[in-house]
Image: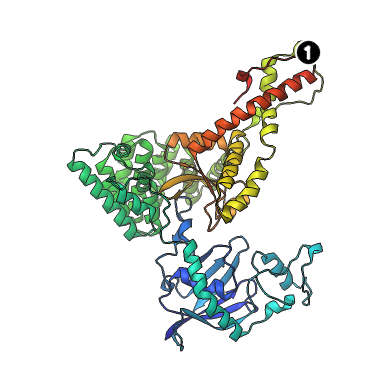
Amino acid sequence: MQYTKIKASCIRAKDRLNRTFLVRPDIDLETLGCVICTGFHAEYEHAFLFHVHKTAYVPESWLDSFNTDFLSMRGRTLSDLGPSFRFTYDTGDNWEFECKVYKRPVDYASDEIAVIIDGAGTGIWEDNAWGFDRYLGGEIPPDTSEDLEDIDWYMPWNLDLDQVSDTDMFDLEDEQDRFNTLLPLDIDTYHEHNPVSSVPYDHTEEDSIWHTFHEYLDDYAPGPQEIRAIFDEFRRVCGVLKENGELPERFDDLEQTGADFSDLYFLIYDMPSQLFIEDNEEDIVSYVKELKSMFIFEREEYEELTDSLAVAYNQLKENKNAQKELDEWREKYPDSFNMYARQVHLYGQIRKLKDAEALLNKLDIMHMEINDENFRLFLSAAGFYRLKGSNRKADQLEEQIERYREQRAEDTDDEDDYDDDDDGFDEEDYDEEDFTDRHMSDMMRRIIISDADRIFRENMEKYRSGMTEETGQALLEAAARSFLLNRKYWISTKKNGDPRARRIDGRSYIVLYTDPKAAEKDGVSKPVMSSSSEMMMYSERQRKHTGYLIDPQPGSDGFIFREEALMDKLYDLMTVFTDQIIEERKLELQYIGIDDPDIDEDDIPF
């Protein structure tokens, strides 16, 4: 049988840890990932991905509006990777391999999916890359055979080594036997945990006209053909509604015909983004123009669609059409900063630098105060001045942008702070309402925050290994406590500053991270701090999100909870803690000399 030869070398130690594989030429990327993982003794505790230049091919579960820089491994083969690529297993420990694909086919007497023909080293150290690096650096004696807890170093748990130096051993015959036995099992296990379709429920009834459209989105695997099928089904449904005289004028009113808002959201936001990734601007023009001709859109939706259309025309070098879209946008919403941002960008692209500068001067950008509405304009203006060589102006705007980003990350709980340096208290000066305002929030925080984080940390690990009702309720209560305290979370933002969301089972969830490291582990390079209250206000304002997703990891969805479940739990918490807060309030007032204080529930600032 003819095979393709691939050599994979660990970046940490290319000569000491590598494998040479023969694989079927048409092997798909998910199976190829299993070949490499099994070949290097990975235990599949983590996800894997491929990098070709700036393109990343990742597991299907990573794909959504949260990160539009990824492409799915599913449906792609070795031929999509070219002559060389990088393979990464475990984005935390970052076991990275440099892989070379040889042009000349190899005849080999086998009918296996893949075989090992050469190599060096035993394998990776699962969850212990730091220990491997310390061994490579000569810090650990070669004859070490047990954990060295005093220096926080441990033997690899996934390798059967008599002493640590055995990690440099490679026995081809033993490795081939092990590989041939485990690979089919590992492939089956991988697909069990990464099914082609995983739809636990379908909230659109089967007799609904939107059922098939919803199913397509639940099974959605990004690609032009898949998007075309989705849009064709959307056309069909709209055609039936029109024949029956039920097609509304306004896009949002499609919900009244049975459409799910999250599905409609896909057409406006996710579809153009995915087609841009695929460099398929022609389809963007076709689909978006058709959408705009069919319905009346709310302002935000109109601006998003028109912006996508203008960018697509610009990429296609159809700058007259791009300008036409911007002219219509200006006529409809003459106060739109997003429109001006796109206009400045287009002027820069077509080298109309004087027009761009005239527009920015007219808007007085250098004396404008940055905010959410004009944030994109500041980005476009800074880019333009940098392009033009006006570095002083570019620096000035970029400083404002950076200050604004920092401002968004600052703690917004200043109103809860007070100066308690003065230990004296004069009862004659006591004002009960002022005392409540200054102290109640701190008492509430002391009571509620006591063990919320601990509960969350302990139960998150249980949740990842297997969901139970008890675990889910514990996590929901911990999350509700955090929201009640207006805890700060880290988010990934879109270009307009809105938080990114992730689509799971046909619904959209705002993604939150408990700390920057959790965000970076999930592929967010520059997370932004935001508060729980800001997220709840945003969710209420947008209406398109079902709830929240906390701390997703590569290969794991994280903890999901719906908005209504959160609100129910918040109400329960407020009810439970009201009596506790009143009792602590009484004790504090008694301590400072106020006997038998009368505290009303209305004084509790929930």
Q: Quadrant of the C terminus?
A: top right
Disc 1 crowd rating (10 Å Cα; few below 14, some 14-19, many 20+) is few
Residue extending farthest left: 243
Q: Nearer the viewer, residue 573 or 296?
A: 573
Looking at the picture, does residue 438 appear above or below residue 84? above
Looking at the picture, does residue 101 appear above or below residue 452? below
Task: Please give the name of the residue rendered at 59% of the width and 39% of the height, measured from the top-left corner.
Answer: 477
Residue extending farthest top: 428
User: In the displayed structure, does residue 433 sit left or right of residue 31?
Assistant: right
Quarter of the view holding residue 156: bottom right
Q: Nearer the viewer, residue 393 or 601?
A: 601
Task: Please give the name of the residue rendered at 48% of the width and 79% of the height, measured from the top-left corner.
Answer: 114
Q: Which residue is mark 1?
A: 427
User: In the displayed structure, does residue 514 sit left or right of residue 270?
Assistant: right
Looking at the picture, does residue 182 appear above or below residue 588? below
Task: Please give the name of the residue rendered at 42% of the width and 64% of the height, measured from the top-left corner.
Answer: 74
Can you give x and y, in whole percent of width and height, for residue 107 in the image? 44, 88
Q: Amino acid at mark 1?
A: Glu
Q: Is residue 405 visible?
A: yes
Quarter of the view holding residue 445: top right
**Callout count:** 1
Quarter of the view holding residue 396: top right
